[in-house]
Image: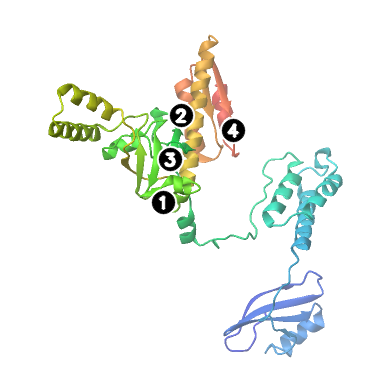
Amino acid sequence: MPVEPKVPGMTVVTAGVTTSRHHLYFIYKMPGKVRTKIVSNDAASLISLLVKDDMFTKNIVDNSAWALSIWPSLEYQQMYDDAWRLLRDYFYDAGMTSIDWDEVYKRYLPLVGRCAKREELDDVLRQMASELSALHVFVYGGEYNLPLHEDESLELANEVASLGATVRRSDEWSGYVVTSLPERDPDFNLMDGKAIYSPLSHDVLKMSGQRGLEVGDVVIGVNGESVINVPSIHMLLRGMAGKSVRLEVLRVKSGPSPLLSRSRRVRTVTRRAAEGGDDAADDDAEDTEDTDHSTPEPLIVVPLSPSDASNLRYTAWEWRTRQAVKQLSSQAGFSAGYIHLRDMSGTKAVDAFVRGFYPDYDKQALIVDVRHNHGGNIDSWLLDLLQR
């Protein structure tokens, strides 16, 4: 029989049995407050509740001013105990794959007492669970001291955008030298509905009439700020993902833009003519101006979000590895194909396999690289296809 208090505006939210099984509890709401009623877990108390106390006037707990005093070290100890026990009780192999699970508990227990924050406890839990060498044993979630309080606007404002390149600070050039630009498979520039290139690459900048940078060029300014005056160039890229950013660059490697070179030559010839210089001097001046890299050029780019930048680097690594496989196999006198699968879940994993398999289906060898694979369930389909 449901318990319905006969008080206007009162609603029972939930009810249950305490962990000791000795009492029943009813949590109910009233206008502006929440209360809890406790009764003994026996027939007499339940009958008394239904017959005599349907107004909820007895055994009421006022939890409006409840506060918990938490001792983190003891809480971490309990969480460690619970995690170890849950694995012991619910692991698929009751013998724990012949691992001495009690010994594992004792081995990692001293580390729990040294944990100063939840992230450190999670690391200990992962190490303990990894002793089983089993898939799909995860540690995630929980209460973390997040400085941005999960405020999306604050997170976006403080998110560090990426120029999609590896750069090195150079005091000699008073800027950051581009040391590498990730390149992806040009045959699959659009993958999973999205094309991602380095914001500094020519593939992106040519669409706005600009030229991309090359390895060896230097970034000296971001939105009017000198990059050498801050500890890291990334400080000037916070909150700039997906937004237009003006860079000042020195084209040490790619050479000055034609329009800028032409304006330099015009200024030089005009100055020499005003000074009464001869033609030979003018030619020498033009050559000198063309090789002068000291004049910064503006460049408008749109930085990537951290996730897009990570995807770009990963995709570039896949492309480099595929090229290395083809080069090394050719040198050894045979042909080989290469497929990398990030995971085996859903249509994206199927698409990744198709992109890698069909261009190389006729090779003498095939490498299926599943390093860093996140798991999934298309393995049977994949094996069936390879066996045909």
Q: CA distance from mark 4 to mark 3?
A: 48 Å
Q: CA distance from mark 2 to mark 1?
A: 33 Å
Q: CA distance from mark 3 to mark 1?
A: 19 Å
Q: What residue is rendered at 45% in x and 48% in y? A: 229
Mark 1: amino acid = Met
The label number, if any, that marks residue 183 in the structure image: none
Between marks 3 and 2 in the image, the one whose residue lies nearer the viewer: 3
Mark 2: amino acid = Arg
Q: What residue is rendered at 43% in x and 42% in y? A: 163
Q: Which residue is mark 4?
A: 379
Q: 10 Å neighbourhood of mark 3: few (<14), some, or many (≥20)?
A: many
Residue at the extreme front of the image, as rendered: 276
In primary-sequence order, the first of circles 2 and 1 is 1
Question: Residue 36, percent across and down?
Answer: 69, 80
Please say if the residues under marks 4 and 2 sit with CB atoms less than 8 Å apart. Answer: no
- Residue in the foreground of this view, choosing between 255 and 90: 255
Q: 10 Å neighbourhood of mark 4: few (<14), some, or many (≥20)?
A: few
Q: Which residue is mark 2?
A: 355
Looking at the picture, does residue 216 appear above or below residue 155? above
Q: 10 Å neighbourhood of mark 1: few (<14), some, or many (≥20)?
A: many
Q: 10 Å neighbourhood of mark 2: few (<14), some, or many (≥20)?
A: some
Residue 331 relative to residue 277: left or right? right
Q: CA distance from mark 4 to mark 2?
A: 16 Å
Q: Secondary structure at mark 1?
A: loop
Number of marks in the rendered image: 4
Q: Secondary structure at mark 2?
A: helix
Q: Which residue is mark 1?
A: 240
Is residue 305 something one can see in this rendering?
A: no
In primary-sequence order, the first of circles 3 and 2 is 3
